[in-house]
Amino acid sequence: MSGGELAGSAALFVLYGGGAAGTVVGGRLASRWDRVRVVRWSYAAAMPAVAGVVFVLGPFFHLFVALTSAALYVPFSLRVTLGQDCLPTRIGTASGVTLGLTVSAGGVAGPLIGAAADATSLRTAPAPLVLFPVLAWLLIRRLSEPTPPEPDAPVSRGVKSRAWSGA
């Protein structure tokens, strides 16, 4: 990983572009197949993509950045809606826990990876990140698609829930 400021800016642009594409594609795929299946596929796709970001040099690096960000953003909103369907009477809590854990884990991991990079190198520090999509894929394998709540089922504090959109 070399190239300076321009290469870093290009990688960030590709990262955010891939993330935006992954978010849109994730919703479209989930409306065609169930969310759990799409999340499984995205974690399976993230495994080689993250390994490519960590271990591939040269012009293909940015391709792997795009694939990684797309594969990791596909399940992002799907996990939120899965959490809401698993806790239909506490959709706010489900959203907060889902998003809060994701952001908190990144907030803890970022400085740790940075410290590892300072102590070793930019090549070796992100290597453990390759294991996280594998772990996520292993954990999601046993999850089944929850039954969506009834459109008129009451939620917490007597508020009526909105119809389930399936995505």
Image (tube, rainbow, N blue to C red):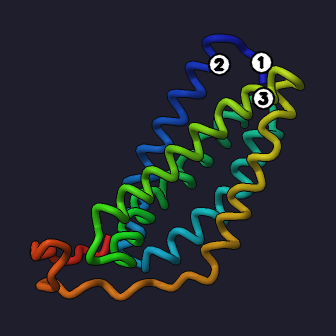
Q: In front: 95, or 21?
A: 95
In the rendered image, which residue does mark 2 sit on? 7
Q: In this view, does 69 lie to the left or right of 127?
A: left
Q: Is residue 121 left or right of residue 106?
A: right
Distance of label 3 from label 2 (alpha carbons): 11 Å
Task: Tell me which label, 1 or 3, sits earlier in the chain.
Answer: 1
**Circles 1 and 2: CB distance less than 8 Å?**
yes
Q: Which residue is tagged 1?
A: 2
Q: How far apart are marks 1 and 3 (CA)?
A: 9 Å
Q: Quadrant of residue 96?
A: bottom left
Q: Residue at x 55, y 27 (%)?
A: 12
Q: What residue type is labelled 3?
A: Gly
Disc number lying in front (3 or 2): 2
Res. 78 image quadrant: bottom left
Q: Mark 3 points at which residue?
A: 58
Q: Where is residue 148 in the image (x, y as percent from the top left)?
A: 30, 84
**In terms of sequence position, does the residue under pointer 1 or pointer 2 come before the other?**
1
